[in-house]
Image: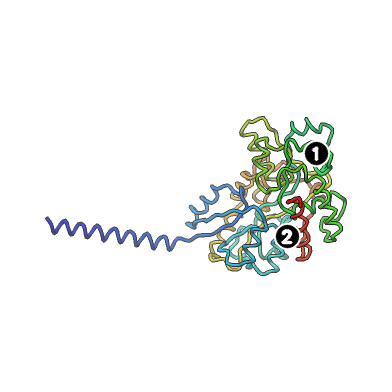
Amino acid sequence: MTYSGNKRGTLAGSLTLATMLACGVAMADQKEVRVYNWSDYIDEEILTEFTKETGIKVVYDVFDSNEILETKLLAGGSGYDVVVPTGQFLARQIQAGVFQKLDKSKLPNISNMWPEVSNRVAVYDPGNEYAVDYMWGTTGLGYNEAKIKERLPDVPTDSFDLLFKPENAAKLKDCGIMVLDSATDVLPVILQYLGLDPNSKAQADLEKAAAVLEAIRPNIQKFHSSEYINALANGDICIAFGWSGDILQAASRAEEAKNGHTIHYSLPKEGTQMWFDMLAVPKDAPHVEEAHAFINFLMKPEVIAKASNYISYANGNLASQKFIDESILKDGAIYPDEATLKKLFVLLPYDAKTQRSVTRLWTKIVTGQ
């Protein structure tokens, strides 16, 4: 009996060790893809579905400014396989050599992409060699219908005058104003608002744009690139200068909460920026095969449509439109008509000198010093 007992113990120990070793090998063999994307920018079910279909684990981290992403990319060794820079940053980063060309033989779903979008992003990525569009949108005004009517009943909501005229901003201070903490998304739009070239690199023009913000700076509660979503939805602020999809998310959240706040997105008549967030693979990505598998999965029409339906952004995949909720597809603030598209400008990348100048101006505005 003693022998048998010892034998059982030895066998159990051997099985436990074998199981542990097997698990260790399985864990070591499990493929993964490391993704670095914007916050609040995907339906997490998509990640689960990707792993279920491919067996590839997704390690998913988020950021909320292009500058944060760029710092990691330029430093090298970020450890990420798929990143999502905005167009003008992508262009500069391509020139800096931080990305590898996509292997399109591993991206059969690239045939689903929308020529209108692909042609526009070619400004940043000639030949569409390094990146594929994930989402695109505009920058504009999100506002609380009742609070704006109460304070500015006679001011049209389809113009940037609503925010950029100091006398209007002063009347909105008490109910809260937030602005994107992103110089490259705000200053070019103000240049357009002033009737100047939104891609101007002239110091005098950039200072004119900065002056518009400085004039309303005392009335701005906060510069932030994501907090305005919940702030609008909860009625904590009455107006925000932000990204179209974020504001539409705020509108959806307010509606779902039935909290009495009605949020609208205004694509102002002066025209505004059309931006693109792109899927790209860093040159030193540790899991290149898995990166391509992830991008190809996202380019499935029904998959990227699920992302658009969740975050209320337009995507660069034409075939996906038959899977997009009608309320989103027919919303002119998300999918603008031809006439509106013509008023949307594409921001060209800044050279290093202009970028430094813009950064200095922005820091002065944000800090108020």
Above or below, 276 against 153 in this view is below
Amino acid type at circle 2 is Gln
Residue 271 at least partly seen: no
Residue at coordinates 23% horizontally, 59% vertically from top-left? 11
Amino acid type at circle 1 is Ala
Please provide percent x and percent y for residue 7: 18, 59
Residue 353 at least partly seen: yes
Please provide percent x and percent y for residue 351: 77, 65
Tell me which colouring the rendered structure shows.
rainbow
Q: Nearer the viewer, residue 323 or 183?
A: 183
Above or below, 234 against 21 in this view is above
Which numbered marker is on residue 294?
Answer: none
Residue at coordinates 63% horizontally, 61% vertically from top-left? 280
Whether residue 369 sits left or right of residue 280 in the image: it is right
Label 1's element?
helix
Which numbered marker is on residue 88?
Answer: 2
Residue at coordinates 16% horizontally, 56% vertically from top-left? 5
Q: Residue furthest front?
A: 369
Of pointers 2 and 1, the one earlier in the residue sequence:
2
Q: Quadrant of residue 1?
A: bottom left
Please provide percent x and percent y for residue 191: 83, 52
Instruction: Tell us which disc is closer to us: 2 or 1.
Output: 1
Please provide percent x and percent y for residue 291: 56, 61
Looking at the rendered structure, the number of numbered marks drawn on it comes to 2
Classed neighbour count for the residue bearing mark 2: other residues with Cα under 10 Å, few (<14), some (14–19), many (≥20)? many
Residue at coordinates 70% horizontally, 38% vertically from top-left? 237
Which numbered marker is on residue 170?
Answer: 1
CB atoms of marks 2 and 1 within 8 Å: no
Classed neighbour count for the residue bearing mark 1: other residues with Cα under 10 Å, few (<14), some (14–19), many (≥20)? some
Label 2's element?
helix
Above or below, 296 against 178 in this view is below
